[in-house]
Amino acid sequence: MRLFQLPVLMLMALAPTALAAQPIDESRISFPAGATGTTLKGRIAGEQITDYLLNARAGQSMTIDFAPSNASGYFNLMIGNDPAAIHVGSTSGNHYKGVLPKDGDYRIRVYLMRNAARRGEAADFTLKVAIGAAASATEAAPAPDPAGGDFADGLSGGPDWWQVTGVAAHDTLNVRAGPGTSNGVIGKLANGDRVRNRGCSMNGETRWCHVEMPGDQPLSGWVAGRYLAEAGAPAAAPGPEAHGSIPCALASGQPMGSCSFRASRGTGGTASIWIALPGGGERYLDFREGRLVGSDPGTTVSHMREADLNMILVDGHERYEIPDAVLYGG
């Protein structure tokens, strides 16, 4: 584990701006008699957070579908009061299905991304939650690695793996929440990225493919099929994640402080970085060949370099200073 401690740059001779406390409403979910699930409707506005608690047992399956009216609305899933989410909506999408690891309360946290919250935006939402019976040992076991067997079948078709190709220089390929440009962008891919084939379908005259980039924080979504070519399985993943702290400030006029981060690195300046926000949640930054190519949906980002330091500005007020050592290792 590495800890990066750097001199704080860009200090401003202004008093710190206090971050507003985020109000949290909490309620417990109950299913109708004889039912295995329920549908809830609600509304959040500004920095409001709503937590839904549901008691479940280890081995049961949980399915969550969250549909907000505002594209900046998401949910996280946590175990009890543990702040480490097992599902982060802003990076993994507004659908979750998984086998629960332990008995106890599970917390579904509904929120607006910070940029939308600070603008006082609101979101009406529908939250569908279902609990299934405990999985058998076979059902609970992880799926076999497609690199060691045949994944493609008559429904999905094509090879097990695609490689992104044909994207213009210094550009990236949008990964969307659904097959079509009307769906929101949830991630970015670059030429050479290897993705698992989850099947393709037509939307009008365009072939869209459901793909998944494996790893500690997998990305799953839809891309235009014309940018995919058949490929072999990717090489083994790089070494363990890096952890540490970087200078940060989350409000205009606020002196730089320190935020903890974790980074999953590839090669040549390719890295996915998650920065822990003091008010809860994480800021996601995606780099390809040392260039910032993406962040959380709905955010506006800019990237400027000073020597070996990457100066990142998010939504005009969040500032992060990320050294090349975080992106490249060393």
Image (cartoon, rainbow, N blue to C red):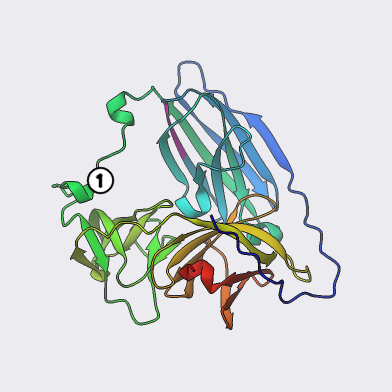
x, y percentage for residue 254? 78, 68
Q: Which residues are magenta?
A: 60-64
* Image mark count: 1
Which residue corresponds to the image point at 50% horizontal and 16% vertical from the top-left? 33
Residue identified by numbered label 1: 145
Which amino acid lies under the numbered mark 1 shown in the image of this protein? Answer: Asp
Rendered view: 327 above or below 281: below
What main secondary structure does the magenta stretch of the protein show?
strand
Q: Residue 304 lies in what quarter of the image?
A: bottom right
Identify the residue at horizontal 70%, vertical 60% (top origin).
118
Q: Residue furthest left?
A: 154
Residue 250 appears in the figure: no
- Residue in front for this viewpoint, 2 or 272: 2
Front residue of 284 and 68: 284
Work out whether residue 211 can be spotted.
yes
Give the image location of residue 97, x and y in percent. 41, 38
Image coords of residue 67 (percent x, y): 50, 46
Q: Give how far across and how far down residue 273 sits, in percent.
A: 52, 61
Residue at 72% x, 71% y is 8
Please name whichever residue, 205 or 138, is drawn nearer the observer in this view of the structure.
Answer: 138
